[in-house]
Amino acid sequence: MQKTVLALGGDGIGPEILEQGLRVAHHLAERSGITLSVHHDLLHGASWDAHGTFCTKQVLEQARVSDAVLVGAVGGPKWDNIRVPGGAENQDGLMYLRHHLQTYLGLRPARAWAPLMAQTPFRTGLADKADVLILREMCGGAMFASERGQRIANGLRQGYDLTAYDEAEVARFAHGGFQLARARRGRLVSCDKSNVMESYKLWRAVVTEVAQDYPDVAFENMFADNCAYQLMRRPEDFDVVIGCNQLGDILSDLTAVYAGSLGMLPSACLAANPAEGPVFGMYESTAGSAPDIAGRGIANPVGTILSVGMMFHYSFGLPEIAAQLEPAIEAVLTTGILTPDLGGTATSAEMTDAILERLDA
Ligand code: NAD
Ligand code: MN
């Protein structure tokens, strides 16, 4: 079986963690009889510096003919305030790809790791079994506002981003959430701020309608502020949590606290409901480009490595290959081979070496 992957290192630690992720991808490909064809290109800041655009048409076209896109991370102070006319898709290379490839279903799993519990602020017994899937809508909402800008209103500078979702955008996303909940522990919380905002009133109405199709999934609506509070207060009660683009972004960094470091969290952005078989997806660590530690070879590679696992699961249709990763990573964490964010001194390459050795053991 031949699989084509577009590899986009991006900025900051992006190329460093992508390199480690690709080592694991080649290893897993070999053991599953896959011939992996990897094309490298630039994204976001690196693309801006080379081409004056955050994502070239060539990258988009290569993504369209690939089975999956593997991304390092993007962004950095050098590019964060560059203004380009148009929507969010013109301001950010990743958002350009999400928009044009319609990878609307963002999976951000966060779990507790026994060897790392001492790294977390949780007292023993509170979050030891935390295992949550935050689902973030990736293609709409305030972050993709078409009505956006800065203007003078009543003599004052005003910034605005129109939050809008239509029912089709919410419904396709909610169906993905309920299907994924079915494949897990059968529980789903949808979070919104429908107590104050119209866009969320529609969100809640549509998700509640979709829930009727899934009587086997225990479903609850929750206000997002309370949801954030409950996620920290009683982590083990949650299974799947779905939210709009902005809430999903924030809640996924919040649940990284279970894992002991933001660098532990993978993500997948899927272009279709994975219940129907392998789908196109973009895979990247949930975290950003960590400019504070870039260039030193010490970034935690696990988020990217687990993202590679999600690529094998959702885009290559090989969940059993993906499932080999977590036990290997847990064994390495137990031996104390840890990057500095986890309290250790290992480099990204040393931690990846140890994971590859474990996979072979
Ligand atoms: P960040 O996620 O890059 O970093 C937050 C903190 O987590 C930092 O202390 C960082 O050192 C640490 N961290 C993140 N990943 C790590 C890893 N793999 N190993 C060890 N430590 C890690 O967030 P930020 O500093 O707010 O943003 C930096 C840039 O990243 C900004 O330009 C932002 O726009 C961009 N960003 C990109 C993505 C993405 O590529 N998907 C996501 C979020 C932010
Ligand atoms: Mn984020």
Image: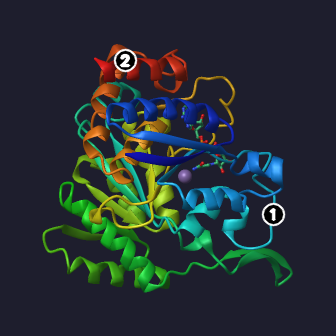
Q: Which mark is residue 83?
A: 1
Residue 105 visible somewhere in the drawing: yes
Residue 96 at x, y percent in the picture? 64, 63
Locate the N terminus and report the quarter of the image it occupies: top left
Residue 225 at x, y percent in the picture? 42, 63
Q: Residues within 10 Å of mark 1 (few under 14, many from 20)?
A: few
Residue 108 at x, y percent in the picture? 41, 51
Quarter of the image where ligand 1 sits: top right
Task: Please tell me in which quadrant of the rendered image residue 189 appears.
Answer: bottom left
Furthest-right residue in view? 155
Residue at 63% of width from left, 36% of height from top? Answer: 15
Which amino acid lies under the numbered mark 1 shown in the image of this protein? Arg
* Ligand 1 under 8 Å from disc 2 Cβ: no
Which amino acid lies under the numbered mark 2 shown in the image of this protein? Glu
Please name whichever residue, 13 or 203, is drawn nearer the observer in this view of the structure.
13
- Where is 219 relative to 197, above or below? above
Q: Nearer the viewer, mark 2 or mark 1?
A: 2
Q: Residues within 10 Å of mark 2 (few under 14, many from 20)?
A: few
Residue 343 visible somewhere in the drawing: no
- Where is 243 relative to 291, above or below? below
Q: Secondary structure at mark 2?
A: helix
Verify CB contact (< 8 Å) between mark 2 and mark 1. no
* Ligand 1 under 8 Å from disc 1 Cβ: no
Q: Which mark is residue 164?
A: none
Residue with the mark numbered 2:
357
Residue at 22% of width from left, 52% of height from top? Answer: 237
Residue at 25% of width from left, 35% of height from top? Answer: 128
> In the image, 297: left or right of 192?
right
- Where is 306 relative to 233, above or below? above
Q: How many marks?
A: 2
Furthest-left residue in view? 216
Locate the C terminus and report the quarter of the image it occupies: top left
